Image (tube, rainbow, N blue to C red):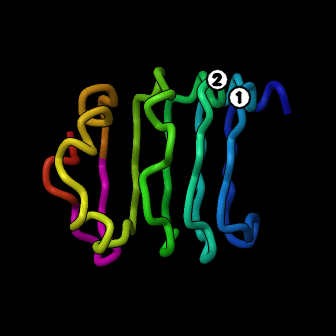
């Protein structure tokens, strides 16, 4: 698993409510797709985890309540796609919460569970 470059966690592959990437995990991973989990509520990324990640896609996660905690540690992230984000979450976030993402990630697209693109998220 040390040399893994792409990881997709899809239908039925993960049933927990929290997904935690610890310091040192998946150092060479370039692309991570996480989707189709009815239980996942939080994704936590420690500093030092996923240090080479360039593309992160999250989809089909109806209970995901936050953007991944620790996303600011992903210095090499170039693409972030979050599909079907809960409208309730987005309505309670201020623009400052997105500042790091919008300033550091060249391609960002976030859509709500009804398919609408979040304003100013696409570049």
Residue 52, by quadrant, is: top right
The mark tally for this picture is: 2
| Residue ranking furthest to the right | 1
Q: Is residue 38 above or below residue 4?
A: below
Q: SS at mark 1?
A: loop
Q: Is residue 105 above or below residue 62?
A: above
The x, y position of residue 4, in whole percent, is 77, 32
Q: Which residues are magenta?
A: 109-117
Residue 13, by quadrant, is: bottom right
Residue 64 lies in the magenta-colored region: no
User: Which quarter of the rendered picture does the N terminus lie within?
Assistant: top right
Which residue does the image show at 60% across and 77% down from the upper left?
38
Q: SS at mark 2?
A: loop
Residue under label 1:
23
Q: Decide if residue 32 is on the left or right side of residue 11.
A: left
Contact between marks 2 and 1 (CB within 8 A): the answer is yes
The x, y position of residue 29, in whole percent, is 67, 30
Q: Decide if residue 60 is on the left or right side of residue 100.
A: right
Which residue does the image show at 31% across and 55% down from the upper left?
110
| Residue ranking furthest to the left | 119
The x, y position of residue 96, in whole percent, is 20, 42
């Amino acid at each position: 698993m040390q040399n893994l470059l792409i990881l997709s966690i899809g239908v039925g592959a993960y049933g927990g409510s929290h997904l935690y990437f610890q310091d040192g995990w998946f150092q060479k991973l370039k692309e991570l797709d996480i989707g189709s989990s009815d239980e996942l509520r939080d994704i936590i990324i420690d500093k030092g985890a996923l240090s080479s990640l360039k593309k992160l896609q999250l989809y089909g996660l109806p209970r995901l309540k936050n953007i991944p905690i620790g996303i600011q540690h992903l210095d090499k992230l170039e693409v972030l796609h979050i599909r079907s984000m809960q409208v309730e979450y987005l309505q309670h976030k201020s623009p400052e919460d997105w500042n790091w993402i919008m300033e550091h990630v060249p391609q960002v697209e976030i859509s709500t569970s009804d398919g609408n693109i979040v304003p100013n998220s696409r570049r």
